[in-house]
Image (cartoon, rainbow, N blue to C red):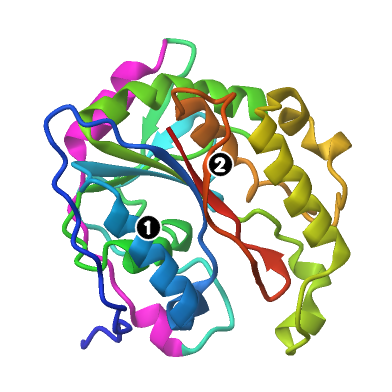
Amino acid sequence: MTNPRPTPPPHPAQSPAPAAARLPALYLGHGAPPLLDDALWMAELARWAGRLPRPSSILMVSAHWQTAPMALGATTRTPLVYDFYGFPQRYYEMTYDAPGAPDLAAKVRGLMPASEPVLDRPTRGLDHGAWVPLLAMYPEADIPVLQVSMPDLDPAHLFEVGRRLAPLRDEGVLIVGSGFMTHGLPYVHDYFMGKPGAPAWSVEFDRWAAEGLERGDLDALFDFRNRAPGMPYAHPTVEHFAPLFVTLGASSTPGEAPTFTIEGYWYGLAKRSFEAR
C-alpha cells in the first residue's frame, strides 16, 4: 500500500549529538492527525527538531496511554495505534516505521525501583500522541522510539517518574511528554466550525500555566485542578496536561523557566509547547 504521508516542510539539518550530549526534555501539543495538514504547525515542529542535537533514541509519554503498573510499548516494528475516530481514511493508512528501542527499554526498567513495577506490552504500537508529532519532527522515522505509559495521573508521581528517567538525557535520549495545554474538546465546537480565536477559559488556563512555569511554581502547577482558571473546561479530563509533569521531572532545573517553542491556538485549544533544560 502506498503510504499517504504528507510532504514535510523543508527540514533544517540537525547537528549530530556528541557523546554524552544532554538533550532537553520536551512537552508538546501533539494535535490530532489533521495537524499534519497544518503548514504552520508542521513548520514549527520541524524547526524545533532541527535546532536540537540528533537524539540517539526517543522516549515518548503520551496522553493516550495510561495503564498501571507502568508499561513499555513495543520494541520491534509494530503497527501503529489509530486511536481516533471519524477522520478521512488516509489518516488510517499513514505509517511511522521507526526502529524499536530494546536497549532503552532495558534502561528504563533499570531506573525504576522495586516499588515501581514495569510491564512489557510487546504488541502495543505508537499511538497518535506519539507518531503524529514524530512524523512532523523526524519524518525519516530513522531514530529508535520507545513509548512508556503513564501509571496514573497524579502530578507528584509523574514528576518522580520523570526524575528517575532524567539520567537518560545524558545518553542522548530525547524525553517527550506529549499532550495538549488545553483540551476542552466538548466546548470548542464553534471553533471547529471556523470561529476564530479561542474561548476565555482556554486563554486563561494557558496564561496561568505559562506564568506558573516561568516562576517555577511547582506547587501551583501540581494543584492545577483547584488553582487554575478555566477549569474544568480547559481539561474535563486531565490526561493531556499530565505528561507535562514527566517533562518537568526530567528537567535538570524544574524550578527554572522553560523555553516556550510553540504558542497560539488550534481550533480554540492552546498548543503551547516548551523545552526544559
Image coords of residue 258 (percent x, y):
53, 38
The residue range painted magenta reads 89-113
Secondary element at tag 1: helix
Residue 137 lies in what quarter of the image?
bottom left
Query: Which residue is at a point 78% across and 86% down the rendered structure image?
Result: 195
Which of the image's four quarters has the N terminus? Answer: bottom left
Q: Earlier in the sequence, mark 1 or mark 2?
A: 1
Q: Is residue 171 magenta?
A: no
Instruction: Give the CA distance from mark 1 to mark 2.
Output: 19 Å
Decide which of 159, 80 is in the foreground and name it: 159
Is 277 placed above or below 91 here?
above
Is 114 placed above or below 245 here?
above
Image coords of residue 196 (percent x, y):
76, 83
Callout 1 touching callout 2 (CB < 8 Å)? no
Residue 186 lies in what quarter of the image?
bottom right
Decide which of 95, 15 is in the foreground and name it: 15
Secondary element at tag 2: helix
Image coords of residue 36 (percent x, y):
43, 77
Residue 170 lies in what quarter of the image?
top left
Is 163 placed above or below 44 here?
above
Query: Main structural element of the magenta stretch: helix, strand or loop?
Result: helix
Which of the image's four quarters has the C terminus? Answer: top left
Query: Which residue is at a point 13% across and 46% down the rendered structure image?
Result: 16
The residue at which mark 2 appears reads as 243
Label for residue 48?
A: 1
User: How many labels, in total?
Assistant: 2
